[in-house]
Image (cartoon, rainbow, N blue to C red):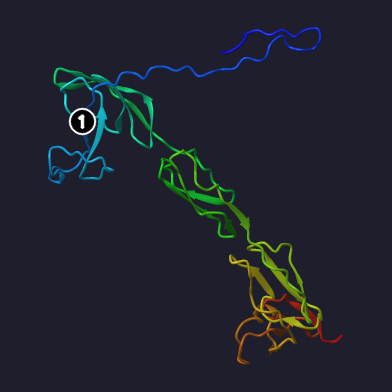
Amino acid sequence: LRGSRRITCRSDGSWSAVSPTCVAVKTKPPPQAKAKRISITKAVPRKAMTSKSHTTTSRPTATTQLLITVALNSSCGNPVLPPKARIRIHRGTVLLIGCKENYSTIITGLMRCVGNTWRRIRDPNCLAKSCSNPGIPKNGYKHGLSYFVGDVVTFTCDSCYRLVGKSKSTCLKNETWNYNQPMCFLKICPPLQDTNQATVFYISQACDSVATYTCNDTRLTMLGSGQKICNKSGMWEGAEPKCINPNLNIALGKPASMSSRWTIHGGPASVAVDGKRSWPVLHTKYEYGAWVKIDLLKE
């Protein structure tokens, strides 16, 4: 600190001194320790090792050695590290052991050079880095139960929903997912319009909803079911509505319970005369429509 440590506010509203300043302190550089080069060998097949030592400092591969210059005062040679471990700090004959990339160091390991041998005083406790559970989107699914660094999870939606966002996400080294959880949105079919002959009715345009057409002229009959279904692709599925005159196939003398059966007149009967009544009565049914009773004496 250069300047006065304490200054006072005077009665005239001014300070008794200027503010002090901080100046960097110059120190002598520490003495250089005598360095010794050791080679830390990765676990590779014996046939892949071409020589006992290497002096290259290039990026290690499956058939090379990783060389680290450390200040060691020993003749212990190359230490054999525990699985998932790597050297973090070297202090003479002592090595502090941490964990490899993608692992968190819970407890630091310790190795000491005793005689000509590296002894493990304490092994490191390594915990694989992982991301939090990404969750399951509403009306969807998550595929994948492992969330370690490098793992991938996949998201899908129910058949009536479409996925918005990325379907895959990867756990990164910083223990976060590279994409946010996607969302599933309900598929909606476009609105339907009435036709010249029929009126459409539906409660919802959502997937799996049903729309029903009815003929405007009650004397006409709907050809087919008169229904459309909003399919999994978000489109209405079904034939266009068509209203036609009933195609009557009269089966005289047949009771109403038999009027939908095959007769000698060919094809299923849709109109029958009930001979059990004291006056002629027709029972008619066209395809999927309801039975209609007609009093012939009043028609």
Q: Residue at x 58, y 65 (%)?
A: 232
Q: How crowded is mark 1: few (under 14 residues within 10 Å), some or many (20 or more)?
A: many
User: Where is 116 relative to 267, above or below?
Assistant: above
Three-letter amino acid code at the position of disc 1: Ile
The extreme right residue here reads 298
- Describe residue 97's horizontal placement relative to residue 133 as left or right: left
Residue 115: x and y, percent? 14, 17
> Relative to the observer, which residue lies in front, 57 or 172?
57
User: Where is 44 relative to 112, above or below?
Assistant: below
Q: Quadrant of residue 285?
A: bottom right
The kind of secondary structure element at disc 1 is strand
Q: In which quarter of the image is residue 127?
A: top left
> Relative to the observer, which residue lies in front, 166 or 216?
166
Q: Residue at x 73, y 71 (%)?
A: 192
Residue 122: x and y, percent? 28, 20
User: Where is 267 relative to 208, above or below?
Assistant: below
Q: Quadrant of residue 121?
A: top left
- Describe residue 78's horizontal placement relative to residue 257 as left or right: left
Q: Name the residue under label 1.
A: 38
> Relative to the observer, which residue lies in front, 113 or 149?
113
Residue 152: x and y, percent? 43, 48
